[in-house]
């Protein structure tokens, strides 16, 4: 059951329509989605620069986001497409 998202939710206005669908299907409020997105993007950049090109894996993403690991896995897959 998707989470109904409304325009008055914090962060809603920053989401692309496709991101709204993903956020809703994962049952994440927009602020949670944005926080995870930012965390994963920043970590991915850090892995590429600081860790000499070491790949950013799904298991790394699961350790960083403080949401269900299955939701994090789906976000990781969405962002790596």
Image (cartoon, grey):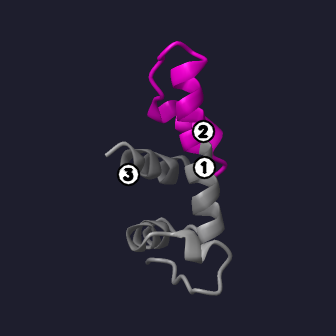
Residue at 56%, 70% (x, y): give it.
14
Residue at mark 3 to residue at mark 1: CA–CA distance? 14 Å
Q: Disc 2 on helix, strand or loop?
A: helix
Q: Position of residue 13 (x, y in %)?
A: 57, 77
Q: Is residue 23 above or below residue 9?
A: above
Find numbered disc 1 in the image and state the secondary structure of the residue it sits on. Answer: helix
Of the numbered discs 3 and 1, the one sitting upstream in the chain is 1
Pick whichever of labels 2 and 3 is earlier in the sequence: 2
Question: Per the image, is 23 magenta?
Answer: no
Report the quarter where the N terminus lies: bottom left
Q: Is residue 63 above or below residue 36?
A: above
Report whether 66 appears left or right of 17: right
Residue drawn at x 47%, y 73% is: 24
Q: Disc 2 vs disc 3: Cβ atoms closer than 8 Å? A: no
For mark 2, what is the residue? Answer: 42
Q: Quadrant of residue 40?
A: top right
| Magenta range | 40-68
Mark 2 → mark 3, Cα distance in angstroms? 16 Å
Residue located at (31% from left, 46% from top):
81
Do the numbered discs 1 and 2 sit on residues whose CB atoms are within 8 Å?
Answer: yes
Q: Which residue is mark 3?
A: 78
SS of the residue under disc 3: helix
Look at the image and tell me whether residue 68 can be seen: no
Q: Is residue 66 magenta?
A: yes
Residue where numbered disc 1 is placed: 38
């Amino acid at each position: 059951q998707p989470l109904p998202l409304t325009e008055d939710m914090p962060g809603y206005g920053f989401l692309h329509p496709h991101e709204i669908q993903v956020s809703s299907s994962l049952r994440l409020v927009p602020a949670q989605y944005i926080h995870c997105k930012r965390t994963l993007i920043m970590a991915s950049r850090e892995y590429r620069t600081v860790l000499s090109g070491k790949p950013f894996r799904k298991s790394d993403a699961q350790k960083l986001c403080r949401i269900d690991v299955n939701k994090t896995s789906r976000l990781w897959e969405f962002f790596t497409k």
